[in-house]
Amino acid sequence: MGTPSFFYHNSIIGGRKLSDIDSVVAEALQLFTDLQDLKKVYSQKVMRLEHSFSEEDWKEHRKNGLFLFKYDRPVFNKDLFLQLIRDVCNCIKRNRPEIKEQIKSISKFFDGVTDDFFEDFLLDGHKVSPSPLSFSPEEQNLLNFVVRQALYPFLEKYVSLLPQEVGDDGWQRNYCPVCGEKANLSYLRQEDGKRYLICPFCGQEWLYRYLACSWCGNEDHKSIRYFEVAELPGYEVYLCEQCHGYLKTFNAKKAVSHEDWVLEDVKTIALDLLAQQEGYTGPGKRIM
């Protein structure tokens, strides 16, 4: 997915206020619509490979909560990845010309990428490590965002071939069963009200307890509350008083339709701002 709300809070919104939200959302929707279209084109080019989990791997995954990347990782085509990196950078420059110099620096970083880069990124917090010393914190955030965008078609293909049991009621942990990342969104199913968390990195969905904090696991209902706003029907924001985390949730019983989750995350940036202005922490600060 690429965690749009994280990207916009750290690299774009800066000191902008809630009163600016309409223009922020309009800018973000254009960028992420373009990025989604770009990734769909590349998804058709990614090779499909069957997974190679042993029976023991699967048992350990379920019993001990080890995410699946520990056993079997996506296969990356370096040339295809670098092509997509260039296209992602060009897409951002078209939408955000004021940061074209930062994008130029980031493009140069990939001249020296080796095959080890992919495994290091997957197993080291889903970020470039070590970050280039010459990069500012804003450039480091932007670098990680670009990489996550370019990796997504490969991760999407990987997830699409997983057994249906991945993320079912035998998991119910507060991190992704595939890659280990924390959710940035969740939804409540219309037919039964069951709650599913959505991974911002690989797109996997998994079942989770209805009233439990997705950050710290707190199950004390008295210390979990939610708010909603009339302008965004169907959305609830759950707040944990123990860890001061928040999670945006789409309640399908209150609204019958939605776009893909990346664009939904963008459309609801106002909810992130409201929660963060009250001192709650969400996506970006808590990856992995």
Image: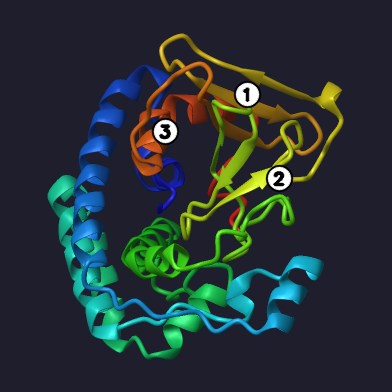
Q: Quadrant of the C terminus?
A: bottom right
- What residue is shown at x 20% (from left), y 39% (from top)? 30
- What residue is shown at x 38% (from left), y 67% (from top)? 157
Q: Position of residue 140 (x, y in %)?
A: 42, 63
Name the mark nearer the viewer: 1 or 3. 1
Q: Position of residue 180 (x, y in %)?
A: 62, 63
Question: Foreground residue, 24 or 82?
Answer: 82
Instruction: Kindly identify the amino acid type of the residue bearing the numbered disc 3.
Output: Gly
Pointer 2: residues within 10 angstroms few (<14), some, or many (20+)? many
Among numbered discs 2 and 3, the one appearing first in the sequence: 3
The residue labelled by disc 2 is 215
Q: Position of residue 237 (x, y in %)?
A: 59, 25
Pointer 3: residues within 10 angstroms few (<14), some, or many (20+)? few
Q: What distance separates the C-alpha of mark 2 from that of mark 3? A: 26 Å
> What is the secondary structure assignment of the residue under circle 3?
loop
Instruction: Kindly identify the amino acid type of the residue bearing the numbered disc 2.
Output: Trp
The residue labelled by disc 3 is 15
Question: Foreground residue, 287 or 168?
Answer: 168
The residue labelled by disc 1 is 278
**Left or right: where does residue 61 sit relative to residue 123?**
right
Q: What distance separates the C-alpha of mark 1 from that of mark 2? A: 17 Å
